[in-house]
Amino acid sequence: MITRRHALKTTAIATAACATILPALAADTNTPIAAVPTSTAPFTLPPLPYAFDALEPHIDAKTMEIHHDKHHGAYVTNLNKALAGHPDLEKKSLEELLNNPHALPETVRTAIQNNGGGHYNHSLFWQMLSKNGGGEPKGELARAIDKYFMNFTGFKDELTKSALGRFGSGWAWLVIGTDKHLSILSTANQDTPISLGLGAPGTTAGADALKGRYGTNLTHTPLLGIDVWEHAYYLKYQNRRPDYVAAFFNIINWDYVTDRYQKLAS
C-alpha cells in the first residue's frame, strides 16, 4: 500500500533530482535544445546542431525553435504518413524519392514532393549555418565562385537578387550541376534542386514541364540555400526580407559549403 508518507517521500526525491539535472542542462549552451526523437518511421527529425539562440542577433531563438521543431518536424511527420503503406518507398533514401518524383505513385506524389522536399531542404539548411560563419569562402570554392560570378560580390549580388525575387515562399540556391558548373537557382515552396533533372536513367517523364518551369533540364545539387519562407524570418524581420537576406550572409557556414563543393566537384 502506498501511504501518504511514502508518497511525500517519493515526490521529494523526484523534485530534488529535477532541481539537480535541469540547471545542468540549461547551463550547457552547446547542447541542442531539440532532442532526437525515438521512432521506427523511415525518417526522423535531425537535432539542431547548435542551441536555438546560437545565431542571434541575425536569427532569433524563437524563430529557430518554431522553424526546426514545428515546421521541419511537420515535414518529417507528414512524409512518414505519405510513405505508410508503401513498403517499397519506405526503403528508399530521401534522395532516391526526390530524384525522380514522376516515378512516385500519383496518390502520394505531391505529399512526398512537398514534405520530402521540406525535410531535405531544411536538413541541409541547419548545416549551412554557423554562429562562427560569415566572411567569404576560401580555396577551391572561392576560385570557382570567381570563375562563374566574376568575384564574391558578383555571387552575393546574384544570390540576393534570386532570394528577393522569389514571389511568395521558396528558396534561393547556389548549386552545382552535373556539368560541374556553378549557378544560382530559385525554387518555389519546398521544391528542391535535385528534383529538377530528367529523372531516372532512360526516362524523360516530366522533363519538359520542369524545364519550362525552371529553365533547366540538368540535375543540380545544392551547395547553399536561403530559405525565404516567411516562417524563416517573420518574427524578427516582419516584411523586411531584404534585411533577413543581408543578415544571412553573416552566418553562412563556409566550411560546410566548401566541403560539399569539393566532394561534388571531384
Image (spheres, rainbow, N blue to C red):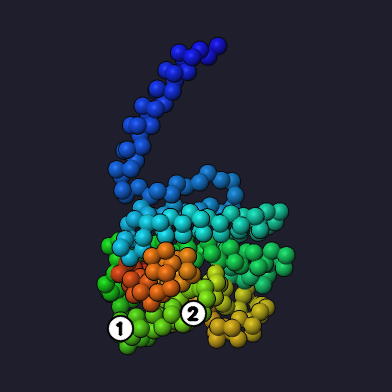
Residue type, numbered disc 1? Thr
Instruction: Give x and y (percent) for residue 209.
Output: 64, 83
Q: Nearer the viewer, residue 173 or 195?
A: 173
Mark nearer the viewer, 1 or 2: 2
Relative to residue 264, is residue 192 drawn left or right?
Answer: right
Is residue 8 at least partly visible in the picture?
yes
Q: Nearer the viewer, residue 29 or 133?
A: 29
Location of mark 1 (residue): 153
Quadrant where the image shows the C terminus: bottom left
Residue type, numbered disc 2? Arg
Q: Are marks 1 and 2 in contact (CB under 8 Å)?
A: no
Q: Which mark is residue 166?
A: 2
Q: Quadrant of residue 86?
A: bottom right
Describe the element under mark 2 as helix, strand or loop. Answer: loop
Pointer 1 local density, CA inside 10 Å: few below 14, some 14–19, many at least 20: few
Is residue 194 at least partly visible in the picture?
no
Residue at the location (37% across, 56% down)? 61
- Which numbered disc flags the more N-terminal residue, 1 or 2? 1
Residue at the location (31% across, 48% down)? 29
Describe the element under mark 1 as helix, strand or loop. Answer: helix
